[in-house]
Image: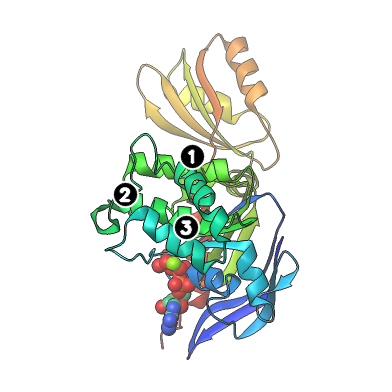
Amino acid sequence: MIDVQHLTKWYGRTLAVDDISFHVEAGSVVGFLGPNGAGKSTTLRILTCFQPASSGSASVDGCDVFSQSVQVRRRIGYMPENVPLYPEMRVREYLRFRAALRGIPRSQRAVAIDKVLEDCWLSSPQDMSYRRLETLSRGYRQRVGLADCLLHDPPVLVLDEPTIGLDPAQVREMRNLVLNLGQKHTVILSSHILAEVEQVCKQIVIISSGKIVAQGTPRELRERVSGPGRLIVELRGAMAEQLARDVAAIPGVQAVEPAEAGEWCRLSVQSTEDVDVRVQVAAMAASKGYQLRELRREVASLEDFFVQITYEQSMRQAPVAL
Ligand SMILES: Nc1ncnc2c1ncn2[C@@H]1O[C@H](COP(=O)(O)OP(=O)(O)OP(=O)(O)O)[C@@H](O)[C@H]1O
Ligand SMILES: [Mg+2]
């Protein structure tokens, strides 16, 4: 559905997007994740024909964003970082104006507006359609921005930080809204909030300093850092040193560190890569008569991965001090 090849964007002497390529399948929800200044908005603005690239190519549903911008815009609903609204207009009036701009036939406008008002929870439980835009809270303004980009029922939605500035309850609502939309549309959204992307997106593209540093499903990315190698074990039945020695004697265990000693002894166990020693730990505990309360693999969070990988990329880019 979306195909990006070797996209590069210079702003004067600043390289904002550095030769990135990725592909988004129809019907998927893709998260574009990166720290501030990574180049997320720039890429999304290029994809939505708001600005040209310096080189490379991009297409949406087979239409080239540079030479077929009208066709691309018909297929895309774009919600920019800061939703520009006319403060003195009322919600319905604004959407009527936008529907006319988008070329929706007059006879279909009222139906289209009612639908997006409902989909974005602007007509119920509370009817906001006659409120002036300047009197809306930020969350509701975001919803109006989203309603606007859904008006022409585009197959592709491009949402630039849809939850920025929202309170936790509104973030949850927006997340549910995006999940809902993902059932019918191809969605690409940007964010620097990992938890959010992890919950909403099937595919994640991580960008840092203008480059793609990793992509895959949240699970694939997490597995890249956690690996099978780390266990947390809680035992009792002997002195902590003895318990640690017994665990260390299991073939495949590389290192054992007492994480906490009390009535129960908590150990952090590092095993050689690709070796899962959980069964052996349980068997050892049973044979020695130790009690075992916890035995779990420590799974690194996506946040660990994100911080690690974007840090590595920024260090590669860092100028060498003379
Ligand atoms: N109009 C512009 N003129 C000059 N430089 C720009 C312009 N827009 C963006 N940049 C620069 O390009 C780089 C990428 O910016 P971009 O807005 O794409 O990042 P981002 O990933 O969306 O960041 P954020 O999370 O803060 O929104 C930054 O270094 C930024 O300063
Ligand atoms: Mg941005």
SS assignment at label 3 = helix
Pointer 1 residue: 176
Can you say whether 72 is above or below 111 in the image?
A: below
Label 3 neighbour load within 10 Å: few <14, some 14-19, many 20+: many
310 or 69: nearer the viewer: 69
- Marks 1/3: CA–CA distance: 18 Å
Image location of residue 279, percent across then percent down: 67, 22
Label disc, if present, on residue 148 of the rendered structure: 3
Q: Point out the image quarter for the C terminus.
A: bottom left
Q: Amino acid at mark 2?
A: Tyr
To which quarter of the image does residue 179 belong?
top right
The residue that appears at 61% across and 57% down in the rendered structure is 154
Quadrant in which residue 246 is drawn: top right
Query: Would you say residue 189 is visible in this rendering?
Result: no
The tag earlier along the polypeptide, 2 or 3, is: 2
Q: Is residue 7 visible?
A: yes
Disc 1: CA contacts within 10 A as few (<14), some (14-19) or many (>=20): some
Q: CA distance from mark 2 to mark 3?
A: 15 Å
When the figure is inspected, residue 207 is found, relative to residue 256, above or below; the finding is below
Residue sitting at the far front:
107
Regarding mark 1 in the picture, which secondary structure is present there? helix
Does 48 sit above or below residue 238?
below
Residue at image mark 2 = 130
* Residue in the image at 55% along x and 23% along y: 295
Amino acid type, mark 1:
Asn
Ligand 1 quadrant assignment:
bottom left
State the image coordinates of residue 188 (x, y, percent, origin top left): 58, 57
Which amino acid is tagged 3?
Asp
Mark found first going from the N terminus, 1 or 3:
3
306 and 312: which one is in front? 306
